[in-house]
Amino acid sequence: MIDYATVKQALFERCQQYVAQRIETAKTAMEAAQAAANEESKSSAGDKYETGRAMAQIERDRHAQQLAEARKLQQELTRIDSGKIYTSGQPGSLVMTSQGNFFIAISAGKITLDQTDYFAVSAASPIGVRLNHVKVNDEVVFNGKPIRILAVV
C-alpha cells in the first residue's frame, strides 16, 4: 500500500527544491550580467562601451524577471498544505488518473519517486483546470482523451 501522505510530502519538497534552484540560477546569472556591465565601463571605446553596457543591462533585467517569476512560484508553494488529505482536486492535492498522477501545486514537470512518475502542475495549467474539483470515479476529457479519476488525496 502506498503512503500517499509521504508521497505528497516528497513531491512538495521536490517542488521547493525546483524553485530554490531556479532562484539560485537567476541570482547567479544576474550577478554575472551585472559584473559584465561593470567590466564594460572600463572599456574606452565610446559606442562599443554603450552598446555592450546596454546589452549587459538587458541581460541582467531578463534574469531579474526570471528571479521574480521564481519568487512568485515560491509564494504559491507557501499557500499549499501538503499534509492535508483532499477529497477533490485542488492546490495541494494528489490526483491519480488513468492517464497519470498529478500533484497540483506549481508547474515543475515530471517527478519520479520509487519508479512512479508524477507530474507537478499548476492549478492554472490546462490539466490543472480540468482536474479542479474532480472526485474519485469522475471522468474528464483532456486533449480529446477521457481521463478517469482513480484517487484524490
Image (cartoon, grey):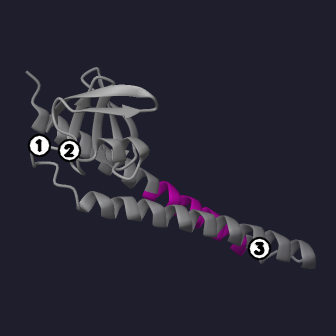
Amino acid identity at mark 2: Ser
Residue 70 lies, in percent from the top left, at: 43, 59
Point out the stretch of residues depicted in magenta.
Answer: 23-38
Asked if residue 150 is positioned above or below residue 49 in the image, the reply reads: above
For disc 2, the neighbor class at 10 Å (few under 14, some 14 to 19, many from 20) is: many
Pointer 1 residue: 87
Pointer 3 residue: 54
Q: Is residue 113 magenta?
A: no
| SS at badge 2 | loop
Where, by quadrant of the figure, is residue 97 drawn?
A: top left
Any part of residue 45 in sight: no
Numbered-mark total = 3
Pointer 2 residue: 93
Residue 18 lies, in percent from the top left, at: 38, 47
Q: Earlier in the sequence, mark 2 or mark 1?
A: 1
Amino acid identity at mark 1: Thr
Answer with left or right where residue 71 lies relative to residue 36: left
Viewer-closest of 113 and 24: 113
Main SS class of the magenta portion in the image = helix
How far apart marks 2 and 3 lie (CA) works out to 45 Å
